[in-house]
Image (cartoon, rainbow, N blue to C red):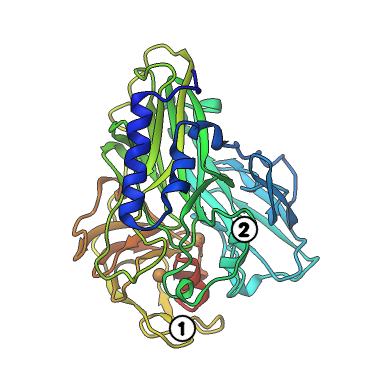
């Protein structure tokens, strides 16, 4: 398409973006003009596809250099030299064997977020290894297909290590998913979302301010797969798009500017029972969403935007880059061939067995204060050597997560998945895309979320924590022992 001329649609979008940025008072109008103006497509960087982890390869954490935009690099810490790290693809029933090598100057350990693994394969901070050391992972894949991820879980150092560049996808496939004929190969887009500083010298540095320690680090510039303001060409065909929120604190409300719904097929725990068309999707830190987008009816040359819609949290403290600010996350440009008519999704994707009546109830209250241990659960700040909760193996329980702080808390549990039953206060609803199985659930200020949970994979020590990375590092985490 001709990029020299400003067509009316682009002009309207650029003008609207400038107007909203100026009203929100968060961006200088000129910066917004540069990013969204007539040459916007050229200022964006092609979304890289993460490399695949080669069979038998080690996972090495080490300092390196990443290309974060055209002609711009940053000093970072990476898994196998990639931001994101290499994608690990495994099938249900396979054994995953990986040597993790620590090439950093500080302790680290890999956690497989959403995977059912024995306790000492889970990356609990007590298992962290020192510089130069190696940790052996060797466990069977015992769960359904889904979109998972891996990241460091070093004691009080997770935020910095993820900020410096350490995170990657882990994709599980199985026969049930194969039968659905979902788009794959170059018709599958993996998108790891982070908000970072627009300044390349600061984009991958970690120097949190006092405000960052309270709210979690919020920045104003979207990055996808490690590049600033990504763009991706798409054919006139159906795509599977899997999105991971690997930010520190940012909550996204995902939507397409074409107003086409996101046809959600899966979330943290794998496939939903059936596809759910959703106008928008809230995605808290650590959560994943898996949807199908059909671009076969989109005219050649059209530019679309995956956005985060504006929303407001009444209690939220003032911030330069507040929760709920509008963000243009990923540009999608329709180019090239129009595919054949897209096959319809089957009416049933998977079957989800509801957990039975709970035999016990527990409540977890999330609070934030101004002292040193500022983020707590039930008044407790994380102690690596203290067991906080003992849960009998196989017992179904009802857990309530109550947010009594002014910040959103994406609540994450290791060692199992849960079913979200109710949300009261705040948004007051459980969204269709939160059905099925989840390992992380977003609890906004004033909300209480009830889940049914059962640990029936392994006994041992696992974690319950807020996945806001500063909250997690500053104590909002408990040890859960499955007995
Ligand atoms: Cu994404 Cu405790 O983890
Ligand atoms: Cu996890
Ligand atoms: Cu939190």
| Relative depth, front residue between 321 and 306 | 321
From the top left corner, tell me how far across and down residue 78 is, in percent: 69, 54
Number of the label disc, if any, that sits on residue 204: 2
For mark 1, does the 10 Å Cα neighbourhood hold few (<14), some (14 to 19), or many (20 or more) residues? some
Label 1 SS: loop
Choose the circle earlier in sequence order: 2 or 1.
Answer: 2
Indicate left or right for 201 with 144 as reference.
right
From the top left corner, tell me how far across and down residue 87 is, in percent: 61, 43
> In the picture, residue 163 is in which quadrant?
bottom right
Mark 1 close to ligand 3, CB under 8 Å:
no
Q: Residue at x 43, y 64 (%)?
A: 413
> In the picture, residue 273 is in which quadrant?
top left
Indicate left or right for 251 with 56 as reference.
left
Q: Is residue 207 above or below residue 150?
A: below
From the top left corner, tell me how far across and down residue 137 is, in percent: 67, 57
Res. 145 in view: no
User: Where is ligand 3, by quadrant?
Assistant: bottom left
Q: Is residue 419 above or below residue 350?
A: below
Q: Residue at x 45, y 47 (%)?
A: 30
Indicate left or right for 159 with 23 as reference.
right
Report the residue marked by disc 1: 381
**Marks 2 and 1, Cα distance to the nearest angstrom?**
28 Å
Label 2 SS: loop
Q: Residue at x 45, y 68 (%)?
A: 216
From the top left corner, tell me how far across and down residue 60 is, in percent: 74, 54
- Circles 2 and 1: CB atoms closer than 8 Å: no
């Amino acid at each position: 398409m001709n990029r020299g001329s400003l067509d009316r649609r682009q002009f309207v979008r650029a003008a609207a973006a400038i107007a909203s940025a100026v009203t929100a008072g968060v961006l200088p109008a000129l910066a917004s003009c540069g990013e969204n103006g007539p040459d916007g497509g050229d200022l964006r960087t092609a979304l890289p596809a993460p490399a695949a982890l080669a069979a038998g390869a080690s996972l090495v954490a080490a300092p390196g250099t990443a290309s974060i935009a055209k002609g711009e690099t940053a000093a970072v810490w990476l898994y196998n030299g990639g931001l994101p790290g290499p994608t690990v693809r495994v099938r249900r029933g396979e054994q995953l064997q990986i040597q993790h090598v620590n090439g950093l100057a500080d302790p680290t350990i890999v956690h497989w977020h959403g995977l059912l693994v024995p306790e000492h394969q889970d990356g609990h901070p007590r298992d962290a290894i020192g510089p130069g050391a190696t940790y052996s992972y060797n466990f069977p894949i015992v769960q359904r297909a889904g979109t998972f991820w891996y990241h460091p879980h070093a004691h009080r150092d997770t935020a910095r290590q993820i900020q410096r560049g350490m995170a990657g996808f882990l994709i599980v496939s199985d026969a049930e998913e194969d039968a659905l004929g979902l788009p794959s190969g170059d018709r599958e887009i993996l998108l790891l979302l982070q908000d970072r500083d627009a300044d390349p010298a600061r984009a991958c540095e970690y120097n949190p301010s006092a405000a960052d320690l309270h709210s979690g680090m919020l920045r104003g510039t979207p990055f996808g797969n490690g590049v600033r303001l990504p763009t991706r060409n798409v054919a006139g065909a159906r795509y599977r798009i899997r999105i991971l929120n690997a930010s520190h604190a940012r909550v996204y409300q995902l939507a397409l500017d074409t107003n086409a719904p996101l046809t959600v097929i899966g979330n943290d725990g794998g496939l939903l029972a059936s596809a759910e068309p959703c106008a928008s999707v809230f995605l808290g830190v650590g959560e994943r969403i898996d949807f199908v987008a059909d671009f076969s009816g989109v005219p050649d040359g059209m530019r679309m935007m995956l956005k985060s819609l504006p929303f407001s949290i009444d209690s939220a403290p003032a911030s330069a880059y507040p929760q709920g600010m509008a963000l243009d996350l990923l540009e999608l440009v329709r180019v090239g061939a129009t595919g054949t008519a897209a096959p319809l999704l089957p009416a049933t994707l998977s079957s989800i067995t509801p957990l039975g009546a709970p035999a016990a109830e527990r409540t977890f209250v999330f609070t934030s204060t101004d002292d040193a241990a500022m983020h707590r659960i039930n008044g407790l700040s994380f102690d690596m050597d203290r067991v906080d909760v003992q849960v009998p193996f196989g017992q179904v329980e009802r857990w309530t997560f109550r947010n009594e702080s002014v910040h959103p808390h994406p609540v994450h549990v290791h060692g199992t998945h849960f079913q979200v039953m109710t949300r009261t206060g705040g948004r007051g609803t459980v969204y269709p895309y939160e059905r099925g199985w989840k390992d992380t659930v977003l609890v906004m200020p004033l909300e209480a979320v009830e889940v049914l949970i059962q640990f029936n994979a392994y006994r041992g020590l696992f974690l319950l924590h807020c996945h806001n990375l500063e909250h997690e590092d500053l104590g909002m985490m408990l040890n859960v022992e499955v007995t």
